[in-house]
Image: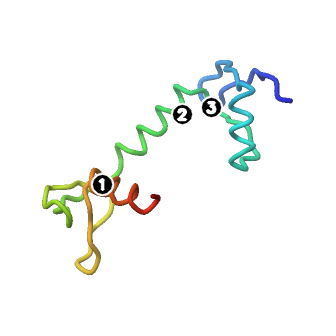
Amino acid sequence: MFEDKTLTCKDCGNEFVFTAGEQEFYQAKGFENEPQRCKPCRDARKAQSRANREMHTTVCAACGKEAKVPFEPRDDRPVYCSECFAKMKEQQEA
C-alpha cells in the first residue's frame, strides 16, 4: 500500500526518506501532512523549544520530593514528580 518516499527538509535542504512504516503511522494517527523536516532538524527544533521553557520548582504531593514542572503550580491542585505521575497514569489505565 505505502512506498518509501524521498522528501526534502525545509530547514537544511537535505533529502530524507519518509518510510512506508512512518506513512502508516501518520495515517493511523490521522495526520494529513507529510513531515517537512528531517529527523535531525525536528530534534533540534524540539530541543530549542524545551530550552526556552521556564521550569518551576515544587514539592511532589505523593512522595514529597522536589519536582520541576513546566507550569506554575497552584495551591488548589496537587503536583506530582515525573515518577509519581507515571505510576498514577499506569494505575488509571489498568
Instruction: Point out residue 60 in the picture as x, y percentages from the top left corner.
Output: 19, 62
Real-space CA distance between mark 1 and mark 2, rounded to the nearest whole angstrom: 21 Å
Indicate the quadrant where residue 71 lies: bottom left
Q: Disc 1 residue type? A: Glu
Residue 14 against residue 55 in the figure, above or below: above
Q: Are marks 3 and 2 in contact (CB under 8 Å)?
A: yes
Report the residue at 77% width, 22% height from top.
4
Report the residue at 26% width, 75% height from top.
74
Indicate the quadrant where residue 75 lies: bottom left
Report the residue at 73% width, 37% height from top.
34
Instruction: In the rendered structure, find residue 42 and report the number of the disc placed on it.
Output: 2
Front residue of 27 and 6: 27
Real-space CA distance between mark 3 and mark 2, rounded to the nearest whole angstrom: 6 Å
Q: Where is mark 3, residue-wise?
A: 37
Residue 16 against residue 55 in the figure, above or below: above
Q: Where is mark 1, residue-wise?
A: 54
Real-space CA distance between mark 3 and mark 1, rounded to the nearest whole angstrom: 26 Å
Mark 3 and mark 1 lie on one chain; the one further toward the N terminus is: 3
